[in-house]
Image (spheres, helix red, strand yellow):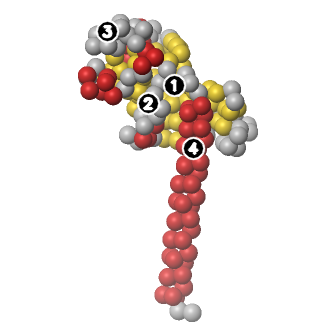
Amino acid sequence: MSLIHFKFRIILTIGILSNFSSFSQSDQRLEIEQAALDIIQKAKYCALITIDDNGRPHARTMDPFLPEKDFVVWLATNPKSRKVTHIKNNPNVSMYYFEQSIPGYVTINGKAELVNEDHEKSNRWKEEWKDFYPDRKNSYILIKVIPNRLEVVNYTSKILGDTITWAAPALIIKN
């Protein structure tokens, strides 16, 4: 076998292995995303965690919309709520989903944006909210969470934390 032919076989083998590795990582990413969606879709509520001016976290139960592509999540609130003030001062938030029927959890970390555009508000409305927001134009504002990190533990899907550190499998999301 000539040296050129030998080098070609090595390059070809490396190429195949690197494609296999990418394919494997892509499959693993899809498995983690699906495991997260399984929990999120079953969980009616999530906790939204914001940070106040003193650096203290504040958690509250929220009724979010299901995630869009790349796990962007929309929520609604009263524009006079503390969470709106927190987000204006520090847009870093976490969302925590838990569903008792699926052992595990999902945490979405990201940046929150306040959205008060009429067309967005009309597209993102739940009829059961009418008692909370009697004046939809003025008593209702949207929060758009653009994720940068997704952590998942889902025992049913065998997506488990590290056996030593318990660190959850995480995906970096670039939006």
Residue furthest to the left in view is 118
**Looking at the picture, how far across and down is residue 5, in whole percent?**
51, 88
**In this rendering, would 120 be left or right of 15?**
left
Which residue carries the number 4 mark?
Answer: 34
N-terminal-most mark, 3 or 4: 4
Of helix, strand and loop, which one carries label 2?
Answer: strand
Residue type at mark 2 is: Val
Distance between mark 3 and mark 4 Cα atoms: 37 Å
Q: CA distance from mark 4 to mark 2?
A: 16 Å
Seen from the viewer's position, the closer of residues 75 and 12 is 75
Quadrant housing the N terminus: bottom right
Mark 3, residues whose alpha carbon is within 10 Å: few (<14), some, or many (≥20)? few
Which residue is painted at 42% across and 34% down in the image? 72
Q: Is residue 166 visible?
A: yes
Answer with mark 2 or mark 1, whichever residue precedes in sequence: 2
Residue 34 location, x and y as percent?
A: 57, 44
Tell me the mark number nearer the camera, choosing from 3 and 2.
3
Marks 3 and 2 sit apart, C-alpha to C-alpha, by 23 Å
Q: Residue at x 60, y 41 (%)?
A: 35
How far apart marks 1 and 3 lie (CA) works out to 27 Å
Residue 82 image-quadrant placement: top left
The amino acid at mark 4 is Gln
